[in-house]
Image (tube, rainbow, N blue to C red):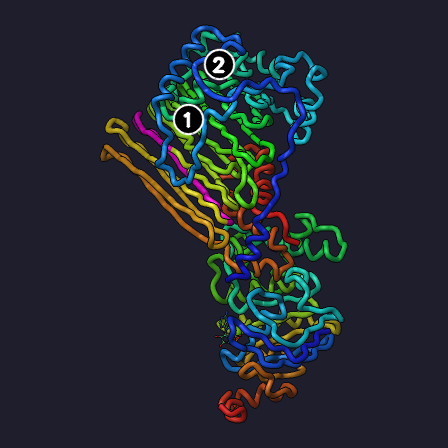
Amino acid sequence: MEEQDKILNEVTQGEYKYGFVTDIDTDIIEKGLNEDVVRLISAKKEEPEFMLQFRLDAFRKWQKMKMPDWAYLKIPPINFQEISYFAAPKKKAQYESLNEVDPELLETFNKLGIPLEEQKHLAGVAVDAVIDSVSVKTTFKETLAEKGIIFCSFSEAVKEHPDLIKKYLGQTVPVADNFFAALNSAVFSDGSFCYIPKGVRCPMELSTYFRINAANTGQFERTLIVADDDSYVSYLEGCTAPMRDENQLHAAVVEIITMERAEVKYSTVQNWYPGDKEGKGGIYNFVTKRGVCRGESSKISWTQVETGSAITWKYPSCILIGNNSVGEFNSVAVTNNYQQADTGTKMIHIGKNTKSTIISKGISAGKSDNSYRGLVKVLPKAENSRNFSQCDSLLLGDTCGAHTFPYIEVNNKSSVVEHEATTSKIGEDQIFYCNQRGISTEDAIGMIVNGYAKEVLNKLPMEFAVEAQKLLQISLEGSVG
Amino acid sequence: MLSIKNLFVSVEGKEILKGINLEINPGEVHAIMGPNGSGKSTLANVLTGKEGYDITEGEVSYNGEDLLEMAPEDRAKEGIFMSFQYPVEIPGVPMVNFLKTAVNEHRKHRNEEPLTAGEFLKLMREKKELVEMDTQLTNRSVNEGFSGGEKKKNEIFQMALLEPKLAILDETDSGLDIDALKTVARGVNALKSPERSTVVVTHYQRLLDYIVPDFVHVLYNGKIVKSAGKELAHELEAKGYDWIKKENGN
Ligand SMILES: Nc1ncnc2c1ncn2[C@@H]1O[C@H](COP(=O)(O)OP(=O)(O)O)[C@@H](O)[C@H]1O
Ligand SMILES: [Mg+2]
C-alpha cells in the first residue's frame, strides 16, 4: 500500500508549464477597494455614466455581502484591501496590426502556444486575448463583421454598442447575485462581448484566452454572449497564470442569453496556476457562469475541463425558461496536491418539456479535495421536464477526497429526474497490468484518466480536445521515468 | 537466460519465498507446480516487478542484467511477459488502444517504427485467429465484462502480439474447459522457438499434456523441493501433493 502511494505521489507531481512572467510595462493602480477606486476604473476606461452607475450599485451591494461559506472548501481569509483592482499592459489595446503589439506580449502568446498570426491563418479560430483583464487583440473581427457578428473586447463593446450592453449586462447574473459576482460587477476591467444576429451560424469557433500577469492583482473579467433567434456559436475559453508564491484572486462572470432556437456551446479549459506541491500559491478561482435559455427550443451547453487553480468555486448553470429548451453541463475537474475544487451546476427548469443533462467527472490525487455540487430544480409549470445526472469520481491514491452534493427539487408529477453516481479508484493492479505490457505508469494513468473522461472530452471542439487530453495527463503526472 | 539465486522474499513481514534457485535457458519449458499458497504467484510477481515485495536476500539475473533493478515496464519490453492468474479490468480503456500502445512501446524499445492503425489491425486479426478470440472482445474495455475463460484467452492473445522471450503463465489453465485449454496451448506452442522460454505455473498436470515441459519443479512452502523431467508431473497427478507435504515434514 505504501509503495503504491509512493508511486502515485511521484507520478502526480507534474510541473506547471505556463508559470513564466512577461516583462511588459503595466499600468497598475494602488491596492485597495473603495468607491473612488470603482470610479477610477470606470474613468480609466472612459465609460459612459450607465456603466459607472452599474459598478457603484454593485459595489454598494457587495459591501453589505459576506463571502459564501457553504462550499466544501477551506478558504484562507482574503484581504480585499491588499489587492490591486486594475492592471493593464501599458501599450493599450486596439492595434491596427500585429506589428504594433508589444513584442514581449507577442512572445507570451507564443509561449502559450497561441501565436495570433498563426491562428489567423491556420486554425480559423477568432481569438480575443485578455491579459490582466484587458483585451489585447481580437483577430478575425473583419471576417465576422461581414456576417453581422460582433466579437470584441468588453470595453470596446461598451463604447461601440452601448445599447446592447445596457440591454443585456447583468440580466442573467444580477449585480448582487453573489459576493463574487457583485465584486466582479464593481471592478471588472475587461472581457469579451459577443453578439450573433438572427439566423447566423458563426462560421468559426470564437475563443478567448485569459492570462494573469501582474503580481498582487486580481483578475476580474466579464463575458457576455447573446445569441439571437436561430443563431449558433461555439465559444472557447482558456486561461493560464504565472507561478507565484502569493495567491491571486480571479473572479469572473460569464453571462449567456439564447433567444428562440438559438444554441451556444461554451467550452472552458481552465489551467490557472494551481500552486506548488506544498500548496503554496495558486489562483483562487471564484467564477459565476450562467446562461438563460430565453427562447423556445434554445440550447446552452457548458463543457469544462478544470485542471488549474488552488481553489475552484464554480457552477456554470442553465435557466431553462423557453419551452423545449435544453441545458447541458459536461465537466472534468482534476485536483492534485493541495488543490480544492467545489464545482458543479444548477439546472433550473421553468418552461415545459425542458431537458437537462449533467455529466461530471471528478479526478482527485495527492492531498486534494474534489466536490461535485449540483442543483436540479423543476418548477411547478415545467411539465414533462427531464434531467439526467451522472456524477463520477475517480481517486488516485488514498490521501485525496471526493464528495458529491446533489440537490434535487421536483415540483410537478410529470417530470423525471435521474441521478447516478459512482466512485472508483485507479488501482495498483491496473497500473501494474499496464506496466507488465510495457506501458509506463505515467502513460497508464494518462490512458485510464482519459478513458474515464472521454465522454466529456468528446464534447470539446477537436483542437481543444487534444490539448485538454494532454493537460489532464500533465496535471496528474510529471516526474516518473 | 534467467538465473535465480537463493531468493528470499517477504510480504508485510511474512517470509513467502525461502531460498529459490532456478536456471532457465533459451528454448526451455519449465513447469512450476505446487499446492495453493506455496508461493508460485509471488515468484511470478517478483520476476515481473510488482511492488510490495521485500527481497531480503538473493539475486536474479536476466540475460546478464540485474533483473531486480529494472522497472516493470522495462522488464516487459526486454521480453518478460506474464499471463496473469487474475487479469484486472480497466474500465474506459479500449482493448485496441491498450494493445496498440503496448505493441508500439515494445517496438520503440527495439528502435522500430510504430505500427500504423492499419498495420496494427492486421496484426491483431492474425493473432486473434491463433487463439480463437471473439472479434467483439477487442472492442470492449480491457477485460471488462470478460468471462473467466475469455480473460485467460486474452492473456495468451496479448502474449502472441508481444512475442516475449520469457513467458510466465500463472495458472492460465484454471477455469478453462478442455477446448479452451487446447486453444491456449496452441497459442503458447506456436511461439515456441530455440530462443524463447516458457514458465508454466500450474496446479494440475492437465495443461502439461499440451504444453510439454522439459523440467518440472515442485514449489512447496516457499522452496523448490523437487525438480525432475516431465514424468514428475504425472507422479504428482497420481500421488497428489500430500506426498510432498509428508516428505517435507508437514
Ligand atoms: N500481498 C500479500 N499479503 C500478505 N500475504 C500474501 C500476499 N500475497 C501472498 N501472500 C501469501 O503468500 C503465500 C503465497 O501466495 P501465492 O504466491 O499467491 O501462492 P500460490 O500462487 O502458490 O497459490 C500465501 O500464504 C499468501 O497468503
Ligand atoms: Mg497463484
Determine whether the residue tagged by mark 2 lies in a helix, strand or loop: loop
Amino acid marked by disc 2: Pro
Magenta stretch bounds: A346-366
Instruction: Farthest residue to the top: give it.
Output: A49
Q: Whole-percent x and y of residue A57?
A: 38, 14
Residue at the image position 39 percent from the left and 45 percent from the top: A403
Q: Which residue does the numbered mark 2 point to in the structure image?
A: A197
Q: Which residue does the numbered mark 1 point to in the structure image?
A: A180
Same chain shared by disc 2 and disc 1: yes
Is B191 situated left or right of A7 in this image? right
Q: A51 or B75, which is in the foreground?
A: A51
**Residue A295 appears anywhere in the view:** no
From this view, report whether residue A115 is shown above or below residue B65.
Answer: above
Q: Whole-percent x and y of residue A277?
A: 56, 45
Determine whether the residue tagged by mark 1 lies in a helix, strand or loop: helix
Q: Which chain letter goes with mark 1?
A: A
Amino acid marked by disc 1: Phe
Q: Main secondary structure of the magenta part?
A: strand
Q: Which chain letter goes with mark 2?
A: A
Label 2, label 1: how many angstroms apart (C-alpha)?
A: 30 Å
Would you call the spot at circle 2 few (<14 residues within 10 Å), some (14-19), or many (20 or more)?
Answer: some
Residue at the image position 58 percent from the left and 22 percent from the top: A130
Is A19 situated left or right of A2 in this image? right
Q: In which quarter of the image is the C terminus of chain A?
A: bottom right
From this view, report whether residue A88 is shown above or below residue B243.
Answer: above
Q: A226 or B113, which is in the foreground?
A: A226
Would you call the spot at circle 1 few (<14 residues within 10 Å), some (14-19), or many (20 or more)?
Answer: many
From this view, report whether residue A230 is shown above or below residue B113.
Answer: above
Residue at the image position 55 percent from the left and 18 percent from the top: A29
Q: In which quarter of the image is residue A64?
A: top left
Asked if the residue at tag 1 contacts the one at tag 2, i.e. Cβ–Cβ closer than 8 Å, the answer is: no
Q: A118 or A7, which is in the foreground?
A: A7
